[in-house]
Amino acid sequence: MSPDNDSFQLPDPDAAMMAGRSHVESAGAAARGQLLRASDVERNQPASAPLPTIVSWVREFLAQPHPELGRTGPVCPFTPLALGLDTIWLTEVADAEPDPERMAELIAHYRGLFLEIEPRSGAAAVNKSILIVFPNLGVDGASVVDRIQAENKGGFVELGLMLGEFHAHNSSPGLRNPDFFPLRSPVPMLAIRHMVESDLPFLRREIDAPETRAAYLRSYLRRLGPNLRRNNFEQAIEALVEAELQLRLAAIAVEAPRLSALPRTVARAGGARTARAAAGSALDD
């Protein structure tokens, strides 16, 4: 689930068949985390419930073209095939006031389940996602989801995954239209998915600290580098060099006062040695 993303790639038929055959194995992993496939949600829950509301939004918004998108095709190019393969999983977190420590454990738990659920590799894997829905957060829902995402994103990127935040007030614009907001959902949620090539703009943002950007970009290049288009590869390298340079300059700025004090320290030490030597000479006389 990667809205406003160009990196769509049809999986080969064998990969699609593998995704279907793996239903039993995936269901075993999902049961441990109370995950439901989108098809099960639609079949077994009332349409007004939180999870069906999200599935309806996925079908009617993410999987469809939009006049404000700025390009042809659906808002999220991966979503139509993911719906067809039934590789969108959902879970509901009922907490109204989530404890940060519990949320960190819960998000890590679903990250582990995501890595267990098939398809685990190949072209079909990019169509898999887990949607963690928070229906009871009230007016603070947006800020809570944003905080959870910010606190946990690094651990996902390190593994080649993305953790996206969706809510009604999300102000992250589309890649081609600054007035289009593809991450606005009817219920607050977090989305787990695999990193793809067009995630680069989300990994090189200036609002992130240089050390954070450098870590994100190293993971991006390490996991996708051999398959990146030349322009994205060069942009990622350039952004990484810039982040590393900013880190070096910051380190120099911290060290500068200490280094500039060294000549004075050496001079004082030299003066003290001279004074001691003179005193010694006076005593000898």
Image (cartoon, grey):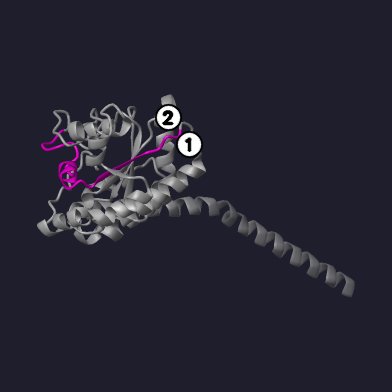
Callout 1, which amino acid? Answer: Pro
The secondary element bearing badge 2 is classed as loop
Residue 98, disc: 1
The secondary element bearing badge 1 is classed as loop
Choose between 275 and 209: the one closer to the eye.
209
Residue 137, disc: 2
Q: Does the magenta stretch include residue 111?
A: no
Q: Does the magenta stretch include residue 91?
A: yes
Determine the residue positioned at 38% across, 34% down: 134
Callout 2, which amino acid? Answer: Leu
Q: In which quarter of the image is residue 280?
A: bottom right
Q: Give the range drawn in magenta.
A: 70-95
Choose between 192 and 258: the one closer to the eye.
192
Q: Position of residue 144 (x, y in %)?
A: 43, 34
Q: Where is residue 204 in the image (x, y as percent from the top left)?
A: 32, 46
CB under 8 Å between discs 1 and 2: yes
Residue 231, visible in the rendered structure: yes
Q: Is residue 217 left or right of residue 106?
A: left
Q: In which quarter of the image is residue 189?
A: top left
Choose between 31 and 110: the one closer to the eye.
31
In this rendering, is residue 252 above or below 280?
Answer: above
Q: Residues within 10 Å of mark 2 (few under 14, many from 20)?
A: some
